[in-house]
Amino acid sequence: MKQSKIKKLVTSIFLKYGLSKTAANISSDALINAELVGAYGHGLSRLRMYCNRIEKRLINPKPKIKIKNISQSITHIDANDSIGFVAADLGIKKAIKNAKRTGIGMVAISNSGHYGLSGYYAEQAVKKNLIAMIYTNAPPAIAPHGSIKSLFGTNPICFGSPTGSKIPFILDTSISMINRGKVRFAEKNNKKIPPGVALDKFGKPTTDAKKALKGVQLPIAGFRGSGLAWMVDILSGVFTGSSHAGKVKDPFEDFSRPQNVGHLFITFKTNLFVNNYKHRIKDNIRIIKGLPKIKGVKEIMYPGQNKYKRFKMNSKKNIKISKIIKRDLEALKNYAI
Ligand SMILES: NC(=O)c1ccc[n+]([C@@H]2O[C@H](COP(=O)([O-])OP(=O)(O)OC[C@H]3O[C@@H](n4cnc5c(N)ncnc54)[C@H](O)[C@@H]3O)[C@@H](O)[C@H]2O)c1
């Protein structure tokens, strides 16, 4: 389907469900971007879930977002259960503004929801020539090292930097072996997940997405990944005033309360300590890319390069709509308040 057509359709669906025009636009842009970078688990496959939660007022369609400037650099946002995209859009814009003014910007957000891809927000800061570090927590998916009960989310860690070229450095990674969106996507499309990424509820390795969702996902690098997930939970949950320690609600399965996700955006100027960052990072990347390669590897890529390539390639094409998403779109389009 043509991108413009999808954009119009998804925006109109969000409007029907009661989002403001601005919120509907921000949210549809974020979903379409996820499709274009190939992060399908965070794209249109989530539209029905957002709409269900808005309908049940677990996402507040008309939030009264409170912005509290603690200093010229530091801001706290209470998102009042707004859709995560809107809270994050506000958060990154504020973090950019603060950093441009003082050198460093820090924005903590509480009472938010799932905001999609951290890299999407980091890119906005990098475009303004800033370094960005972004954290968000997510519902339980991973057992802390030594436990059999899932508690940490797939809690992505994101770091973005200008590179002196068109393609930004964006390390944006879940701390699970694969992100939960991929597991849900596999479940929805009757596909297997790779071996070694999840255990079923009895603690047995599984490639069945349904069983994995009922069991636990495995963290990257054992106890190290578990530690990173914990760090993200502290920064995005404990520090911001949002839910933490396994209390973030699962957007697909738990309709008892709003999600109460927390986000933390830290942005800073590249020239705080050196005045030739652009030259230095170009040099850094050139040296690393010039290293001898393993057989079969054509190019040593830096994080973000692959996503940028996918985005460039896909942005000229129509978006493929699976049967399931087509069905979702049809049902949501005909929703009457
Ligand atoms: N909002 C949430 O609750 C939530 C939770 C989990 C994940 N996510 C999002 O899901 C997205 C996907 O996460 P993921 O863990 O599947 O990412 P991924 O595994 O696709 O990529 C992780 C990182 O590795 C880099 N990379 C990939 N191949 C590379 C290569 N050959 N050489 C060098 N670098 C390479 C990528 O550019 C990326 O920065 C992220 O945008 C993340 O923010 C969101």
Image (cartoon, rainbow, N blue to C red):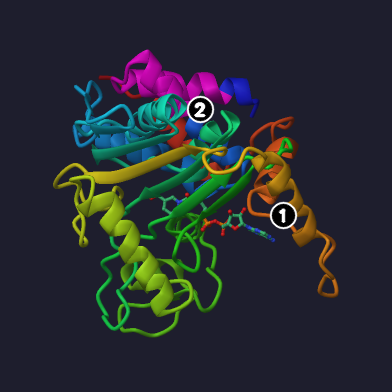
| Residue 84 figure quarter | top left
Q: Quadrant of ligand 1?
A: bottom right
Q: Is residue 321 visible?
A: no
Residue 225 left/right relative to 250: right
- Whether 105 is among the magenta residues is no
Which residue corresponds to mark 1? Answer: 284
Residue extent of the magenta highlight:
6-29
| Identity, as a three-letter code, of the amino acid under mark 1 | Asn
Q: Is residue 152 visible?
A: yes
| Residue 168 figure quarter | top right
Q: Nearer the viewer, mark 2 or mark 1?
A: 1
- Whether 25 is among the magenta residues is yes
In this picture, is 232 found above or below 310?
A: below
Secondary structure type for disc 1: helix
Residue 241 left/right relative to 153: left
| Identity, as a three-letter code, of the amino acid under mark 2 | Asp
Which residue appears at 84% of the width and 70% of the height? 292
In this picture, is 2 found above or below 220?
A: above
Across and down, in percent, residue 150 comes to: 28, 70
In this picture, is 157 found above or below 63?
A: below
